[in-house]
Image (cartoon, grey):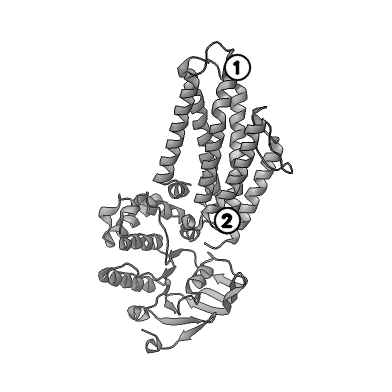
């Protein structure tokens, strides 16, 4: 995993990630200090959440699609030859690399939760942790995995970074539809999107996990089939 | 004793065939050179032989337990220290921390890289990076080592040292398989020359039959 981490998350990517989190934090601070105090506590949370969460979703998904695609490009994966001649199977290389990216995704979500709540407590306008919002972040994690997995399948099929444009377009269309219509865009019940009315995902966890597991299975098969 | 036996392997990329019913075996303690024109499948053959590439049909019997491989082209992690990278690969090869440390100190000194042990790989020259790739292949004292165009980027003194290492390895019974477009550079170490042509492999009898 250390090896994968060093390859996939170079200085440029780490700088980009830190910049994203920092800018997001600044945005959240701006929003919370502009909230009016005379609202009910719950409504304040609602306004704050609805003003900040779409940006978190947007940045998170774009970032994860980029990380998934970049990490599994053949050029970035050449060292697998050295690992394979060091008694590591190709299947284990894939799984450990995938696991590294998942941990990264999880860490990103945790940092975003901190970025969401730090302004809340610093401003003293809200003084409790809203559990619904924590669930929303878990949903964000699954949504990120969904789009990351689509990017991964395409990158393993075509070995081209620009493949990320397809899931990005699907994401932006559903994102735009959800924001403008206030409800999720469901195509054949397989598109995982966030619903801003309910603050939750369009699908239940069972379906989302099944779709993600199927994607991992397809990616694993393609990875084994591909040449180093 | 045969360290690798290859029996009628076929390899295709899509509909394009690269290797056809190729059969060959490699003996312990000998140094083999694979030659052939550009694109005939020398690197592909080596990758199939090592199990890095899948074959479409045929059988490969491998009798080695420790393997070293120097690929023709590889991108190493630029932001990792030399010592960390080699440590990691040594441990993955099943060596203990102590074994890795002793062998690493020896190899870094031998290849004039001791001063660079804490440098980031990205800051090294092409030749130094090639030395790192060679060191990782030598770490666990393999009984089969495969060099794909290994002299790329090495200066004359380092090339001579590599030939010395090849001789040492042969003396302890290890098998060396290498490829090059300039076979005569290796005439002091190579025992047998094999040529890949039109997907088949054949033995070249004498060095003067070779192109350079």
Q: Is residue B84 left or right of residue A80?
A: left
How crowded is the residue under tag 1: few (<14 C-alpha within 10 Å), some, or many (20+)?
few
- Label 2 to label 1, Cα distance in Å? 45 Å
Please say whether residue A146 is visible from this viewpoint.
no
Residue drawn at 54 percent across, 33 percent down: A56
Location of residue A126 with respect to A194 vertically, above or below: above
On residue A34, the disc is none
**Mark found first going from the N terminus, 2 or 1:** 1
Furthest toward the front, the residue is: A180
Identify residue for label 2.
Answer: A156
Depth check, mark 2 against mark 1: the one in front is 1
Q: Is residue B172 left or right of residue A98?
A: left
Q: Which residue is mark 1?
A: A43
A104 vs A115: above or below: below
Q: Residue B168: percent from the left, percent from the top?
A: 34, 71
| Chain of residue at mark 1 | A
In the image, B3 versus B157, the foreground residue is B157
Query: What is the secondary structure assignment of the residue under circle 2?
Result: helix
Residue A23 is situated, as x and y percent measured from the top left of the image, at 44, 32
Identify the residue at image location x=53%, y=56%: A160
Res B193 visible: yes
**In the displayed structure, does residue B158 sit left or right of residue B149?**
left
Chain letter for the residue marked with disc 2 in the picture: A
Dot 2 surroundings within 10 Å: few (below 14), some, or many (20 or more)?
Answer: many
Up the image or down, A63 lies above or below A79; here it is above
């Amino acid at each position: 995993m250390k090896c994968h981490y060093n390859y996939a998350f170079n200085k440029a990517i780490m700088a980009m990630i830190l910049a994203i989190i920092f800018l997001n934090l600044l945005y959240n601070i701006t929003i919370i200090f502009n909230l009016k105090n005379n609202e009910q506590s719950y409504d304040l949370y609602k306004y704050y959440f609805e003003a900040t969460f779409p940006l978190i979703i947007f940045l998170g998904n774009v970032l994860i699609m980029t990380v998934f695609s970049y990490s599994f490009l053949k050029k970035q994966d050449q060292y697998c030859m050295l690992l394979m001649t060091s008694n590591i199977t190709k299947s284990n290389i894939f799984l450990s690399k995938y696991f590294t990216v998942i941990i990264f995704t999880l860490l990103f979500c945790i940092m975003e939760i901190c970025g969401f709540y730090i302004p809340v407590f610093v401003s003293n306008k809200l003084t409790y942790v809203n559990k619904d919002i924590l669930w929303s972040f878990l949903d964000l994690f699954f949504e990120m995995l969904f789009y990351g997995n689509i990017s991964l399948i395409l990158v393993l099929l075509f070995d081209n970074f620009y493949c990320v444009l397809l899931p990005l377009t699907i994401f932006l269309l559903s994102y735009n539809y959800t924001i403008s219509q206030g409800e999720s865009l469901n195509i054949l019940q397989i598109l995982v999107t966030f619903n801003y009315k309910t603050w939750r995902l369009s699908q239940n966890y069972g379906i989302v996990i099944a779709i993600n597991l199927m994607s991992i299975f397809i990616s694993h098969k393609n990875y084994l089939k591909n040449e180093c | 004793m045969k360290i690798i036996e290859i029996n009628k392997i076929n390899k295709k990329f899509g509909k394009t065939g690269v290797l056809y019913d190729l059969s060959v075996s490699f003996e312990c303690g000998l140094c083999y050179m694979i030659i052939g024109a550009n694109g005939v499948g020398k690197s592909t053959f080596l990758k199939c032989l090592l199990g890095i590439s899948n074959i479409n049909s045929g059988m490969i019997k491998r009798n080695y337990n420790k393997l070293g491989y120097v690929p023709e082209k590889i991108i190493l992690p630029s932001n990792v220290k030399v010592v960390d990278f080699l440590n990691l690969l040594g441990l993955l090869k099943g060596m203990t921390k102590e074994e890795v440390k002793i062998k690493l100190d020896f190899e870094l000194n031998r290849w004039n890289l001791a001063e660079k042990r804490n440098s980031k790989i990205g800051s090294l020259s092409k030749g130094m990076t090639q030395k790192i790739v060679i060191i990782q292949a030598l770490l666990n004292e393999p009984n089969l080592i495969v060099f794909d165009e290994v002299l790329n980027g090495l200066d004359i003194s380092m090339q001579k040292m590599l030939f010395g290492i090849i001789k040492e390895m042969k003396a302890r019974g290890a098998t060396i398989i290498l490829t090059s477009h300039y076979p005569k550079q290796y005439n002091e170490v190579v025992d047998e020359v094999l040529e890949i042509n039109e997907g088949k492999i054949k033995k070249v009898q004498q060095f003067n039959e070779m192109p350079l």
